[in-house]
Image (cartoon, rainbow, N blue to C red):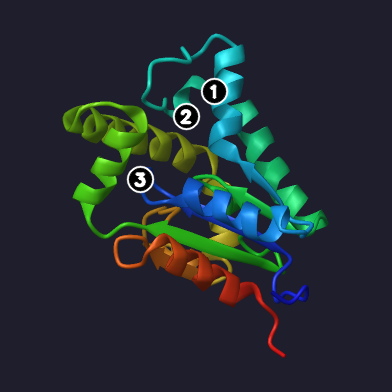
Amino acid sequence: MSQKYRYHNITISGLPGCGSTTMLGMLKEELGNNGGKWTGFSGGEFMRDYAIVQGLFKENTGLHHDATVYPPDFDRQVDLGMRERLQKGKHQIFEAWLSGFMAQGVEGTLKVLMICSDEAVRVDRIVNRDNVSPQQAIDNMRVRYEKNTKKWREMYAKEWNEWVVQKGVISADKPIDFWNPKLYDLTIDTYKLSREQSLQTVLDAIQAQS
């Protein structure tokens, strides 16, 4: 690939089972390990490690926990710190539920939304990843989504208004939805595209036109 890029940072967002962590790994391999200078950061893994150290989460329980185990101040510190790094740094890849939202209005950042249009495939991925039953996976997905979005809607109502509503991206009468495709530059459906096709879609998007 050319070493000239249209974007100097990438965010990857998506709900569990949509492939955001897989995309981070592939981009790190392609843009970082193969002689590039790009670095990758997983917000989910960072928060998980923090929860284990703080005794908020038992490491071997399999399923991922929800965001309510963290104090709001810590959440904001991590999230807004990510936004600051996007504003100041280059050749960074951030994967987190809210990374695309935190990149609103930040120039030079490609905001990628990962989705999976087949819910059964999402469930199956989590079953295999966490070694749990399908019902456990479904319940965990639902609870995490409900608790996380409730917390973040309250925490980031002011930022939503400033970054999204006032900029005319989404009207004020619409509910806060951190994974609305209108917030993103690129939406990838991992049910319809293979891993290789998904990766190439992102690489094509960031590569500078000759």
Residue 39, horizontal then vertical, whole percent: 72, 50
Please tell me whether residue 73 is drawn above or below residue 171 in the rendered image: above
| Labels 1 and 3: the sequence-earlier one | 3
Crowding at dot 3, Cα within 10 Å, few <14 / some 14-19 / many 20+, comes out as: many
Residue 2, horizontal then vertical, whole percent: 74, 77
Please tell me whether residue 169 is drawn above or below residue 41 in the rendered image: below
- Distance, label 1 to label 3, CA atoms, is 22 Å
Q: Which mark is residue 17?
A: 3
Q: Are marks 1 and 2 in contact (CB under 8 Å)?
A: yes
Could you tell me which residue is drawn at 61 percent across and 21 percent down? Answer: 50
- Distance, label 1 to label 2, CA atoms, is 6 Å
Q: Which mark is residue 45?
A: none
> Identity of the amino acid at label 3?
Gly
Which quadrant of the figure has residue 54? top right
Could you tell me which residue is drawn at 29 percent across and 61 percent down? Answer: 191
Could you tell me which residue is drawn at 42 percent across and 35 percent down? Answer: 148
Tell which tag, 3 or 2, sits nearer the viewer.
3
Please tell me whether residue 207 is drawn above or below residue 39 in the rendered image: below
Tell which tag, 1 or 3, sits nearer the viewer.
3
Quadrant (top left/top right/bottom left/bottom right) for the N terminus = bottom right
Q: What is the secondary structure assignment of the residue under circle 1?
A: loop
Mark 1 sits on what residue? 70
Q: Nearer the viewer, residue 115 or 151?
A: 115
Which quadrant of the figure has residue 123? top left
Q: Residue furthest right?
A: 88
Q: Which mark is residue 67?
A: 2
Q: Are marks 1 and 3 in contact (CB under 8 Å)?
A: no
User: Relative to residue 150, is residue 72 drawn left or right?
Assistant: right
Q: What is the secondary structure assignment of the residue under circle 3?
A: loop
